[in-house]
Image (cartoon, grey):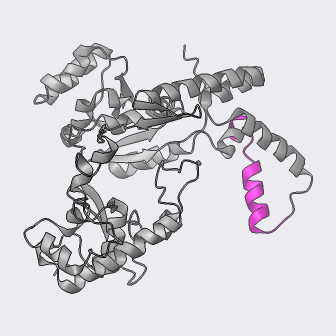
Amino acid sequence: MDNKMYFKRKIYDKLVEWKKNSDGKTALLIEGARRIGKSTIVELFAKNEYENYLIIDFNIAPNEIKDLFINERSDIDLILQKLQSFYGKVLPVRKSLIIFDEVQFCPEARSMIKYLVADGRYDYLETGSLISIKKNVENILIPSEERKINMYPLDFEEFLWTLNDNATIPFLRDCYINKKKVDIAHKRIMKDFRTYILVGGMPQAIAEYINTKSFDRVDEIKRNILSLYHDDINKHEHVIFDLDDGSELRYMDTRKFGKMYLIKKEDINKIGPLVKLGLEPWDDNLTSEYLLDKYKKKKLPIKSVLLDQNIIVGIGNIYADEILFLSKINPLKKCNLITKEEAENIIKYTKKVLEAAIEKGGTTIRTYSSVDGVHGLFQNELFVHGKDKNNCPICNTKIEKIKVGGRGTYYCPKCQTLQ
């Protein structure tokens, strides 16, 4: 008997929409933190929307299942036959769903999505936890057939749904739109909201509250979940500095891109990576002549070269897109073809973009915050990066997203023509 408590979630309608629009031509990856209900909602979706389904939980799947995606990659028929045999499932063609749960534990299965989707017999859903899924992709090709959707804990409206309250949010929305007073309902709604603040949006905590009404039990569950999160984070903490005031400075590198050097103070500009660094954006030696000399023997796209810290330091992926947009330079233009005027514009707008970003405290797209816990605000000032669903603020042409040197790149095809 299934004793799981299923909650109504907004993401469910998005899953239904994906199934309808995709028609088997794409897979869907649901990303989100642990314990927010990813596995539960996909299983409910599978039960309701398909004749049959199969769940592979790669967190507990035996090696013989994982090995299918490593050693039998060339034989999709064999993979599908063995999966159905192992899990005791008969999957009707085009009426069944295969779920790769916790897919971060088997990146080889994720890389097979391209071929499984092309095979066309079944639909495919993947779930993955945020920290681990970003780490375990270093040696695989992310399939272009994979679409992504983010999932979060229950919001206030979803919390009210768990209490069988479907009326409050539409009522509040109507009051807001038509400028009506909430009146006598205000006290009851605020009580529910305070309860939501105490319980939170984690499904396990909400289920406990519904069953016991005990905030102590709820708090215990939330602390256990936080402990899991801390364990996840601690896995990626590679160096911890104990400071004189008793605090700690922790170096966390999920994808292991960073390097750390132990160097004597007097040798800091003689040894290690600092020796190779280029000029600061505000260095008087940063001139068009300097750039053209660095660019003249390079045939790489200018976007890739802007990210080269051996030429100019401090330009990251987001800022490179903004600099090129303001300079009206196509990101694919070969840097050895950059003109003197374009080089001057690159210098001009590098300073302008970085000064504005510093003033706004940086750019918080996902997880950045300062040491004071303050998020940056420059993301609100971006013209093109991350705006592929928007139109150009200058010419109203749709912003496009491409890959340049493996990095997501945003530009306006009209303002930044490739000459």
Residue at 64%, 37% in the rendered image: 201
Q: Nearer the viewer, residue 289 or 302?
A: 289
Q: Nearer the viewer, residue 322 or 278?
A: 278
Magenta residues? 161-180
Q: Quadrant of residue 172?
A: bottom right
Q: Residue 299 appears at what percent x and percent y?
A: 9, 67
* Residue 177 among those drawn in magenta: yes
**Vertical relation: 80 (above or below) 383:** above
User: In screen coordinates, is 111 left or right of 300?
Assistant: right
Residue at 30%, 21% in the rendered image: 90
User: In screen coordinates, is 131 left or right of 221?
Assistant: left
The answer to whether residue 26 shows anywhere in this view is no
Q: Residue 303 appears at what percent x and percent y?
A: 23, 66
* Residue 38 among those drawn in magenta: no
Residue at 75%, 21% in the rendered image: 216
Q: Quadrant of residue 89?
A: top left
**Vertical relation: 408 (above or below) 329:** above
